[in-house]
Image (tube, rainbow, N blue to C red):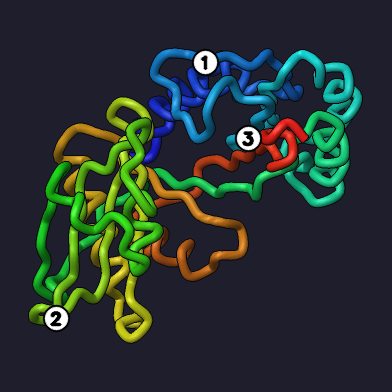
Amino acid sequence: MFKDYYEKLLAQLSLDFNCTSADLQAKENIIVTSALNEGRRSYSPGKPFMQMVTVGMNTVIMADECLHEFLHGLVKDVEGHHLFEFDNLTKLNEELKKYGYQMNPTHHMFLPDSDIKIENRCEVKWLYDDEINKFYGDRRFPNAIAFPEPCPVRPDRIVVIACDGDTIMGMAGCSEDAPHWQQIGIDVLPEYRSRGIGSYLVSLLKNKIIEMGDVPFYGTAAANIQSQRIALKSGFKPAWVETEAWCTFGAQAGL
């Protein structure tokens, strides 16, 4: 299962990072110019100033040409995955400050690896597309769906809710971040945590997405151990790490 999705991943990352599948698997680090390719995942408005990704070998950095000279010096003789370590991210952040940008945290990303036997744990309800609208702005679900309002670039497609009678215990949702690429998010209310509800909902949603013929994927922060455990229990496997530069408020305001 993982191998099939991995080939699709290389094709998608090639669009996202304006490179080739071979670039993502090269021995040396690769620096390319920022572009807005059709079918890419988009997490910020306009052309990206700097984004970087590794699938475990080298690192590909897509960046504005004004950064290229600095980046070539930064990546020289450095193994790809080391570029995501604190000392190198700090160097990169200092350079970005000159242009009104700063580093965003790294995102650890997962792809399906195995089928998980799912035992019924509770009643669930499924919602699709416009049926999700009533939950926007609900502070209980900042990860399962877009918060506080819908995101036209990454529309929420499916939600599955765990219910205790009329009470919601948790919600998993997926957003279509690129055509047929559905990113899963999960929120379990504090009083219902440590009961397996998170992995139950994520597993159900993962299977639903696969049945549709789309690609489910899952992302989390490096230190969010609980979220990573949910991913592993739901049949996901670590596949890539990525990060990007974000414009600071002062630069956006023209200050």
Residue 70 is at least partly visible in this image: yes
Dot 1 alpha-carbon crowd within 10 angstroms: few under 14, some 14 to 19, many 20 or more:
some
Query: Hey, which residue is sitting farthest bottom in the picture?
Result: 191
Q: Quadrant of residue 52?
A: top right
Q: Earlier in the sequence, mark 1 or mark 2?
A: 1
- The answer to whether residue 119 is left or right of residue 100 is left
Q: Which residue is mark 2?
A: 164
Q: Which residue is mark 3?
A: 54
Relative image position of residue 20 (x, y in whole percent):
56, 14
Q: How many marks?
A: 3
Question: Residue at position x 66%, y 45% from top?
Answer: 104
Residue type highlighted by circle 3: Thr
- Disc 2 on helix, strand or loop? strand
Give the quarter of the figure containing the C terminus: top right
Dot 2 alpha-carbon crowd within 10 angstroms: few under 14, some 14 to 19, many 20 or more:
few
Question: Residue at position x 70%, y 30% from top?
Answer: 58
- Disc 3 on helix, strand or loop? strand
Dot 3 alpha-carbon crowd within 10 angstroms: few under 14, some 14 to 19, many 20 or more:
many
Q: Which residue is mark 1?
A: 36
